[in-house]
Amino acid sequence: MASVNICLVGAGNMGGALLGGWLASGHDASNITVIDPAPPESMQQLLADRGVVHSTSAEGVAAPDVVIVAVKPQIIVDVLAGLGSLVNGSNVLVSVAAGTTIDTLSAPFLAGEGLSVRVVRTIPNTPCLVGRGITACFAGEGVSLEQQQSITSLLRAVGEVVWVDDEALIDVATGVSGSGPAYVFHLAEALARAGETAGLPGDLAARLAEATVSGAGELLRQADSSPATLRENVTSPNGTTAAALEILMGNGGFPDLLERAVAAATKRSRELAG
């Protein structure tokens, strides 16, 4: 995939993670152009060190094979308005913005009569920053299998990639994996607070909670067993874990709370789409 020409629009956290992943996996830096009017200093240094072309706008930039727009949903429509020279009927536009539909992403490029735009909508998550993310993707009309394969290869540089066959499911994926890291961080937060309330020093409670959450995640990643089996393995009958799980798995516990949380995030993603 090193020969695929990429234009990355936006060099913030997610854009920077993608760029770092491509370079680490051997993508030819000369085939990457970054458009960002004011990238962070660390990113400017990386661009200079690795010979990645940097432009403050789309002016003078040749249309690439893939345009990846990694900016926040609040500004993506304004950003897309300046990319008309980059998007044509044969290349593919990829968005990582939550709640921004294929129709919204296509609209700025449909002024030309008969012009079709190939768009892929994705929702990555923040573990992409450490190469352990997962990105859900939906391909709009006209996106070829070859283009999907190219995009899969590019996104695998920062983690796993899955495809859904219904655009509405991207909103659900937003509620599960896109927003999900925040739920896990809050679990660590709440677990530490509970330990402190029960008598542990605050710094020790935080250390125990954070190591437990990250360690359990790594065990889940490496194990061949399902989460349910792993839970059962650590739960002795009538033991301490069983006593805790009676609370967490009871009415109003984890299952109910997470269903409500995912539903709320999904609903908000759809509201952002207008």
Image (cartoon, grey):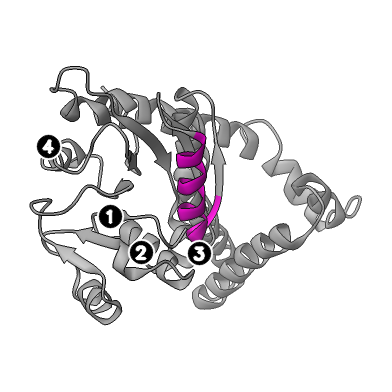
Q: Which residue is mark 4?
A: 81
Q: CA distance from mark 2 to mark 1?
A: 8 Å
Whether residue 218 is visible? yes
Q: Which of 25 and 274 lies nearest the eye of the viewer?
A: 25
Residue 238 x %, y %: 89, 50
Q: Which mark is residue 28?
A: none
Q: Secondary structure at mark 4?
A: loop
Reading the chain from its start, which is encountered first: label 3 or label 2? 2
Residue 196 x %, y %: 54, 67
Reading the chain from its start, which is encountered first: label 1 or label 4? 1
Q: Are marks 3 and 2 in contact (CB under 8 Å)?
A: no
Q: Is residue 120 above or below residue 8?
A: above
Q: What's the residue at 20%, 25% (across, down)?
A: 107
Reading the chain from its start, which is encountered first: label 3 or label 1? 1
In reply to whether residue 149 is colored magenta, the answer given is yes
Near mark 1 (Cα within 10 A), the count class, few <14, some 14-19 or many ≥20, is: many
Reading the chain from its start, which is encountered first: label 2 or label 1? 1
Residue 123 x %, y %: 42, 42
32 lies left or right of 20: left
Q: Amino acid at mark 3?
A: Gly
Q: Which residue is mark 1?
A: 8
Q: Amino acid at mark 2?
A: Leu
Q: Which residue is mark 2?
A: 19
